Image: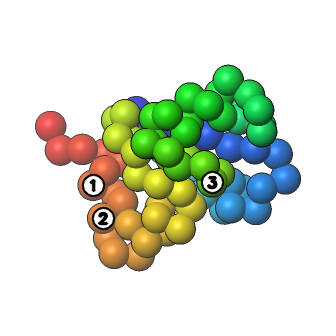
Amino acid sequence: MSKIEIYTQMFCPYCSRAVKLLRDKGVTFTEIDAPHGSAARRDATARSNGGTTMPQIFIDDRSIGGCDQLMALDRAGQLDPLLVPSG
């Protein structure tokens, strides 16, 4: 199973949508609370090379972007292979 991390903030509809998709996929992931001004938010921005929107999603330490990028990967059939890499 891939290591999946998602930085989120409360009351963010994009965060909720991304978390729902990952839950629907049945994968294990770590959700990191990253409100404005927090160390977690700064970490997410640094790890994503400047991405400031929420959520910020990482699969095996690779930034894939936010909710829109996650949904686009899923629509293109490219998300599932990232979630469960072939070994």
| Apparent side of residue 72 relative to residue 29 in the rendered image (left or right) | left
Location of residue 7 in the rendering, given as x and y in whole percent from the top left corner: 61, 40
Q: Are marks 2 and 3 in contact (CB under 8 Å)?
A: no
Q: Badge 3 local density, few (<14 within 10 Å), some, or many (20+)?
A: some
Which residue is identified by label 2? 78
Task: From the image, tell me which residue sits under label 1.
Answer: 81
> Pointers 3 and 1 in contact (CB under 8 A)?
no
Q: Amino acid at mark 2?
A: Gln
At 56% from the left and 29% from the top, the residue drawn is: 43
Quadrant including the C terminus: top left
Label 1 and label 2: CA atoms lie apart by: 6 Å
- Vertical position of residue 58 compared to residue 20: above or below: above
Q: Which residue of the protein is positioned furthest toward the right in this rendering?
A: 11
What kind of element bears circle 3? loop
Total label count? 3
* Residue 67 pos. (x, y %): 56, 61
At 41% across and 52% down in the image, what residue appears?
Answer: 64
Q: Are marks 1 and 2 in contact (CB under 8 Å)?
A: yes
- What is the quadrant of residue 24 in the picture? bottom right
| Residue 35 vs residue 81, the one in the foreground | 35
Q: Amino acid at mark 1?
A: Pro
> Which kind of residue does numbered mark 3 sit on?
Thr
Q: Is residue 81 above or below residue 46?
A: below
Out of 46 and 24, give the one closest to the viewer. 46
First in sequence, mark 2 or 3: give its number.
3
Q: Residue at x 50, y 45 (%)?
A: 50
